[in-house]
Amino acid sequence: MELLLASKSPRRHYLLKESGFDFKVVDIDVEEDFNEELKAQEIPLYLCEKKSKGYTDDLKNKILITADTIVWLKDKVPNKPADINEAKQMLQQLSGNMHQVYTAVCMRSENKTHSFFEETKVYFKTLTESQIDYYLEHFKPLDKAGAYGIQEWIGYIGIEKIEGCYYNVMGFPVSRFYDEIRNNFEL
């Protein structure tokens, strides 16, 4: 079966490619809004399933993969920052705190839809203002949930520990995806 990845995330493309999956990237234009009553993992589950429903082409002999990643900090979602000032505020909030990263994945074929989520707890050390400023000046936090990439400098120096899947924090829980697609679809 042909795999279709509906994602603009370069990190998802990289992780799937490096894991040996052959896939074609497709575009889906869906508004990523959600009901404020949704909490934690409910949000990315809702969004990845919404994205999947937004794909209307034929899925004969194909599996569509959609995903969404959120940062969950103190019962709120700090999304992708709108600008550098908002990115700085987000990193200041993450500093010295634990937060969860939830990635949900939806896989849909002609006859079946299967979704799952993965949770990783991330513990940031207390960051200095100069560390935050350095990261903001030298890296690109605006396209990342929570304004940081664990695979970048801020992850090297600022993350004390994680509980769960590292690749989930990058935006795609590859090992879990591998098991879920093998157990739920005939490839």
Image (cartoon, helix red, strand yellow):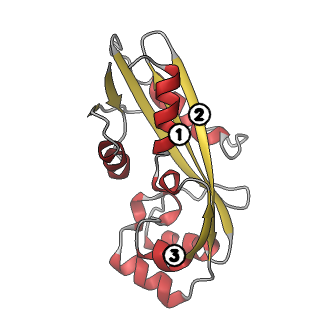
Q: Mark on residue 116?
A: 2
Q: Earlier in the sequence, mark 2 or mark 1?
A: 2
Q: Is residue 7 above or below residue 144?
A: above
User: Where does the image place residue 173, in percent across and percent down from the top left?
Assistant: 50, 45
Q: Which residue is painted at 53% across and 62% down in the image?
A: 146
Closest to the observer: 156 or 31? 156
User: Where does the image place residue 139, in percent across and percent down from the top left?
Assistant: 35, 73
Mark 2 crowd level (few <14, some 14–19, many ≥20, 10 Å Cα): some
Mark 1 crowd level (few <14, some 14–19, many ≥20, 10 Å Cα): some
SS at circle 1: helix
Kind of residue indicated by mark 3: Lys
Mark 3 crowd level (few <14, some 14–19, many ≥20, 10 Å Cα): some
Mark 1 lies on residue: 176
Circles 1 and 3 in contact, beta carbons < 8 Å: no
Q: Residue 66 occupies which quadrant of the picture?
A: top left
Kind of residue indicated by mark 2: Phe
Kind of residue indicated by mark 1: Arg
Q: Which residue is painted at 52% across and 30% down in the image?
A: 180
Q: Residue 16 occupies which quadrant of the picture?
A: top left
Give the mark toward the camera: 2 or 1: 1
Horizontal arrangement in the rendering, residue 169 relative to residue 14 (left or right): right
Q: The N terminus lies in which quarter of the figure?
A: top left
Give the mark toward the camera: 1 or 3: 1
Can residue 31 be spotted in the picture?
A: no
Horizontal arrangement in the rendering, residue 31 relative to residue 58 (left or right): right
| CA gap, disc 3 and disc 2 | 31 Å
Q: Earlier in the sequence, mark 1 or mark 3?
A: 3
Q: Which residue is painted at 61% across and 64% down in the image?
A: 162
| CA gap, disc 2 and disc 1 | 9 Å
Mark 3 lies on residue: 88
